[in-house]
């Protein structure tokens, strides 16, 4: 049975993706920091639980050693640490944002890619954000920087995979009413966006999981290096690359 690894699998988009991939016949590996939440997802998927920080090299190497080759990687774990100006920011918060949103996707992509190459097939899916195209006065400099960087990383890795049956792409999962949305609302830096999601109920996380399943099913050449949007989302797709 093919293995799919999903980070941030305890809730929201990560849980929806894990459920969808399990329904597609994958053995799902669930990575996250909160055991209770992962156990809830495991009850829905039959997945294996790995409690740990996705940016911890030793922990993630152990996960891959136990799993063996992974066919699908969904780097979903992410954080938003507020709206402080750079000159007033907390260096530790910046470090945590970049570790979770940039280094962890790099680390797991680096660890999973050799096994995918050995299998002759693989999908590396980075859950990014439209914030990666935001202007300089956008929603939190550290978060924007992390998504800009993740988008560039996606394109760079995709360029290395051209001609193979492996693909690397990024997605915007929609305006989902997740725990991160709660944090952003509490920080108060994006009142218009928070109100929109509150009023509409947001995009269901299942739209993101549907997109992930389409990427998995599509030929590598159709998705490699692309930034992809959910269908019928609150925010219309914009030109990316």
Image (spheres, helix red, strand yellow):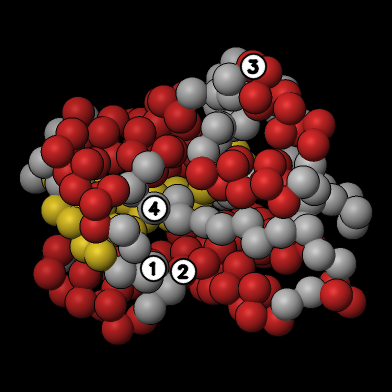
Coordinates of residue 204 in the picture (x, y in percent): 49, 23
Q: Residues within 10 Å of mark 2 (few under 14, many from 20)?
A: many
Disc number placed over residue 200 in the picture, else none: 3
Compared with 52, 147 (above or below) is above
In front here: 174 or 120? 174
| Residue depicted at 22% across the width and 62% down the height | 50
Say which of marks 3 and 1 sits in front.
Answer: 3
- Residues at discs 1 and 2 in contact (Cβ within 8 Å): yes
Whole-number angstrom distance, CA of label 4 to CA of label 1: 9 Å
Whole-number angstrom distance, CA of label 4 to CA of label 3: 24 Å
Secondary element type, mark 1? loop
Q: Is residue 185 visible?
A: yes
| Pointer 4 residue | 8
In front here: 233 or 68? 233
- Residues at discs 4 and 3 in contact (Cβ within 8 Å): no
Q: Is residue 124 visible?
A: no
| Pointer 1 residue | 54
Q: Residues within 10 Å of mark 1 (few under 14, many from 20)?
A: many
In front here: 202 or 209? 202
| N-term mark: 4 or 3 | 4
| Pointer 2 residue | 104
- Residues at discs 4 and 1 in contact (Cβ within 8 Å): yes
Coordinates of residue 109 in the picture (x, y in percent): 41, 65
Disc number placed over residue 220 in the picture, else none: none
Secondary element type, mark 3? helix
């Amino acid at each position: 049975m093919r293995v799919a690894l999903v980070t941030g699998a305890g809730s929201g988009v990560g849980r929806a993706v894990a459920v969808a991939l399990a329904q597609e016949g994958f053995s799902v590996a669930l990575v996250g920091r909160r055991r209770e939440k992962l156990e809830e997802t495991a009850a829905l998927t039959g997945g294996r639980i790995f409690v740990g920080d996705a940016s911890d090299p030793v922990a993630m190497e152990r996960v891959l050693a136990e799993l063996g080759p992974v066919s699908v990687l969904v780097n979903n774990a992410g954080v938003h640490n507020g709206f402080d100006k750079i000159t007033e920011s907390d260096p530790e918060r910046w470090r945590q944002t970049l570790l979770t949103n940039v280094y962890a996707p790099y680390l797991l992509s680096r660890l999973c890619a050799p096994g995918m190459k050995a299998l002759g097939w693989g999908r590396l899916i980075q859950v990014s954000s439209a914030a990666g195209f935001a202007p300089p006065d956008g929603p939190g400099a550290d978060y924007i920087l992390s998504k800009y960087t993740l988008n560039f990383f996606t394109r760079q890795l995709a360029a290395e995979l051209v001609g193979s049956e492996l693909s690397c792409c990024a997605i915007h999962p929609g305006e989902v009413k997740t725990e991160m949305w709660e944090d952003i609302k509490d920080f108060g830096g994006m009142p218009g966006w928070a109100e929109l999601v509150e009023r509409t109920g947001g995009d269901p996380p299942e739209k993101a999981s549907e997109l992930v399943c389409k990427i998995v099913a599509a030929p590598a050449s159709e998705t490699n290096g692309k930034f992809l949007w959910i269908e019928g989302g609150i925010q219309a797709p914009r030109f990316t690359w």
